Every structure is written in C-alpha cells, then in structure tokens.
Image (spheres, grey):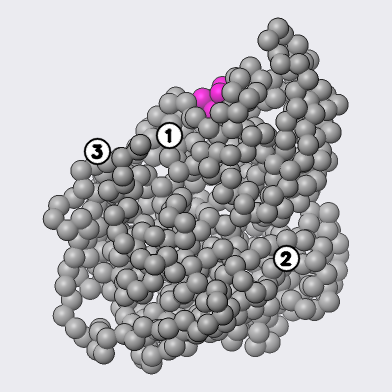
Amino acid sequence: MLRRARGLGALLVLGVVSAACQPTPTPTPSAGESLAPFVATSHPADAPADCAYGGEIAQIKAVDRLTVEFSLCYPDAAFLAKLAMANNAIQDRSWLARYGAMGRLRANANGTGPYLVSDAAPTTGDEITLGRFDGYWGPPAKAATVVVKWSPEPSTRLRALQLDRVDGIDSPASETLQTIQDDPALQLQRGEALSTFYLGMTNTFEPFDSLRIRRALAVGIDRQQIVDAAFPPGTSLADYFTPCAIEFGCAGDPWYDHDLAAARAVLAKPGFPGQLTTHIYYRDEAACGLPDPALIAQELQTQLKDDLGIAADLQPQASAIFLDNLSAGLLDGLYLLEWCPELPDVTSFLGHHFNNPANDQFGSIDPTISNALAAAARAADPEARRSAYAKANDAIRDLVPMIPLAHGGTATAWKADVLGAVSSPVDGEQFATIDPGGRAQLVWMQSGLPASFYCADANDADSRRVCQNVFEGLYGFKAGSADVMPGLAESCEANRELTVWTCHLRGGVTFHDGSSLDANDVLASFAAQWDYGQPMHAGRVGAYASWVDQFGPFLNAPAAP
C-alpha cells in the first residue's frame, strides 16, 4: 500500500452513470499538467482566519507541489486520525469546480483509489460496479471488478451468500453468527469491539425535558437484561458511551447500577404526568456487527411496559430518513442507534455527539458537557485530556442525554475461499486487498445503497465504504483495523504544540481521469468543506456534519437568525 508505482500516465475515462442514467461528461486534464509551473496558494489567501470564528483550522497552505501546511487555532492530538476519515478524501480541484458548485458530486466520482466507478450511480438501481484503476500508485487491486449490492434484510444477505450469489456480506444477523461459523463453506470475520449502541432522547420534547424522568430511565432500565436477550455473544455492557479500548474513553465514574425500586419511586412522585406514552424510533438496518435494531426495540418496549408502566410504540424508519431526523432533533420519543466510529479517538464518540453544533439529536447540550469536551479536544497534555474527559463523562452521567447499552464489534461473512477477508471496525472494508477465491469479480452485499459518491457530505456507512475504495485521504486505515497509516501523504508531522501540521504528498499520483495530484487539490478539497462561502460548498445537502464534528464551525458561515 505504501510502495510507489512507476510509469503512471495514460488518460482513463471515468464512465459514471448519472441519476438520469446518462453518461457523465469527463473533464479532460490539461496537457502536461504535472509539468506546468506550480502556483502556491493559501486559504484564506491573505492571512490566517481570525480564530474567533470558532473553528479549529486557521489557514491551509499549498507550500509547493507536494507540501501542504495546516495551521490550527488550538492543539489537536487526533489530527492524523481525522485526515483518515472518508469525508477528508482528496478531490481533483478541476472536478470540484465543475461539479461541486452544482451539487452534482454525489453522482460523479473521480478519485485516486484502487477502484473507479464504472457503472451506476448512488440512490438509483440495485448495484454499483467498480473497476480496477490500472494507473493506481500502489499495489493493484486483486479483483478486476467489484459489484456492490444491497439489501436491508440480514436474511436476504445471508441467503445470497449461501447460494453463491455474493462473495461477502455486511452485518449478518446476530442470531446467525454461530451458524456461519459452523458452515465449512463460509467464514465469519469480527472487528474490534469499538462500536456503541445506546438509547437516546431529545430534551426539547416532553417528557424528556424533565431531568427527573431521564434519571429514572437511567436507573430503571435493566441494560444487562437487554444485552443478554438481544445482543450476540461477546457483546459487553457499556458503562461509558466510549469503549474503554479508546484512550480516555472511560475516565470518570461508570454508569448507574440498575435500581428498579428507585426508578419507580421517582416516577410515583407528585408531578409525574400519569401514564407515560412515547415512541421508540430505530432505523431499519443493522450496522457495526450489532443485531437488528428491531430485536432491541422489542425487548426495550416490553421492559418499559412491564417494569416502569411506560407504553411505547415502535417506529422503524428507513436509514437515511432516520439519520436526517436524528441530526435535526426531530425524534419526539426514545430512539435506538449504534455508533460505528470513523476514527479511533474519543472525539469521534463524545465530540461528535455532545459538542457538535450540527448535531441536534439530544436537544440542548448543557455547557458542563460541551465546555469539558472543548477543553479536552484542545489539550496537548495527555493528563489534561484525561481530566477534561472525566469531567465530560461525569456530566453526561449526571444529565442523562442518553443511556449507553452495549459495546460490540463489526461482523462480516464471506465465502470460505475468499482470501484477505476482514471486518473493518470503522466500516472501511478495502476491497483491493481481498482475493475472491481467484475469481476476477468480487461481489459484496451491504445493508443499504450509498447515498452519495461525495462522502464529505454523506454520513452513512454504506456510502463511506464505497468512497474509501474510490477515493483516498492523506491518511487512511489499515485493512481490518482502526489504526491509521499514510495514504496520499508519505508523512505528516506536527510542531511541538500540535498547532502546525506539515504533510508531504506522494509524487506521481493521478486521479482516475488522468490529472495529477498536487497540494492545491488538497487545499481545494478541505476548503470546499470548511468555507461556507465557497461555491463548491453545495455538497449533497450542504450539512458537512463530519467536518463540523471534527473541526468545528464553518469559515464565513452566515450569522444565526
């Protein structure tokens, strides 16, 4: 993966079919682009941004053709992990200029990865075909083509695998894991237990605006019973939102012990609004190797009724609709969700959920939580980070914006003859390293169709998986691991204060249309997300939730009404 390829050059045509099923026009790179004089640029062009705008980035400089410098407003120990995330994949600046301003990047892909999109578009059809990119800078992909299919039903995916219609599937149902392990024709792969399943509530809706009721649920729900009844073996009860395998994740006090009598006593006090009724929302597909959310919802529904006298109806929603409603704070009941981490750092858990202006899923976040998380994210000293995360975890425990249920690992199932099969803990299976039993074609079936080829503005795992095989970031993840490794950058190093990061790009890298990678492509890719005033900021829906999660508010964002 780190070896530079030689003799890159021939112009390749990217045949992407748009949502209207018409061929996508392919820009022609400038002749001799790699030999043209390089013009160093910066964003902002004149001087670093005034850090009073609230974000992490102050300025990005394309110092020379293969050098990029990021100046930060405060230290960031997780910077390399953020560079590895799918939203920070590098786009060709000419491609961005052509399609970005029109919001058409979602159906037009031009990356540097080992595969290029050769057929179909996201949100349409029933499969996507990826073809091997013969100009790839690293080792060539083992399979000539990859066909990506999808079905929200775990039973449908498993049946397709058993009938030899596919080579691998994502998220088999928890009750089938032992069956897969016992089948000599199949193999089961498990990822590290880095995911979290939790019960959330939005405190802008009654009765969850009452801290008394939230605390009653925190002690009254028998979390261990739910884990035992609805989760696969190997799942652990969550005492913190972040798994303890993540550094600083378990600083502070653990979650409450189950105390049904105390919960009933609280709910019986004067002021309780009588018979409580609510909804249990969940999305209609599984992820992270965790079981079908419907099983957990049914177990929770029964327990709420039998133990606490709370009547709750079940409200499954399509994944994309659920996630949009969630981030907008529109779910007026309890909801169940898994969190599959995109990067192996506590900021991906706590920062994304509890200190993220783009995420309204919990309603109003108390400053005791967000202030502690802001301090932790900006601390260069490890002990200072640990102390700040302990304060944040204790405040989350005290204020109960959610109830952590379980930690689990991802799961994938494959035909037995597939070599190099893995289950990525960050939903980033790298198809190029997988040999489908010597066959020319690898067929993969996942839970849902990708929402976009532009993962800077897509928050679903099924899009990210495809993106990470077509596009690359400065850093990436090792196959089957959450460990980061150099990608389009040979290296990135920081100053002592962790406020200036300098990245050195690989030479000789080309995009799928033949244009050459240079530092201005990196600058344009980041500026499109960062700067609200950029024409290329249109994106898919313009939310760029992952960017806000990682780096804070946009530059030049309009004032709140």
Is label 3 in a helix, a strand or a loop?
helix
Q: Residue at x 45, y 43 (%)?
A: 358
Residue 442 lies in quadrant: bottom right
Whole-percent x, y for residue 473 in the image: 41, 66
In this orientation, does residue 74 appear? Answer: no
Earlier sequence position, callout 3 versus callout 1? 3
Is label 1 in a helix, a strand or a loop?
helix
Quadrant in which the C terminus is drawn: top left
Q: Is residue 58 above or below residue 521?
A: above
Label number found at residue 196? none
Name the amino acid type tagged 3. Answer: Ala
Q: Is residue 33 above or below residue 536?
A: below
Residue that label 2 marks: 151
Residues in magenta, as a range = 394-399
What is the distance, in whole Å, between disc 2 and disc 3 at their CAs? 46 Å
Q: Nearer the viewer, residue 315 or 90?
A: 315
Residue that label 1 marks: 373
Label number found at residue 52? 3
Whole-percent x, y for residue 198 in the image: 65, 39
What is the distance, in whole Å, between disc 2 and disc 1 at their CAs? 38 Å
Q: Nearer the viewer, residue 48 or 507?
A: 48
Q: Is residue 326 above or below residue 320?
A: above
Q: Residue at x 80, y 46 (%)?
A: 295
Q: Nearer the viewer, residue 354 or 168?
A: 354
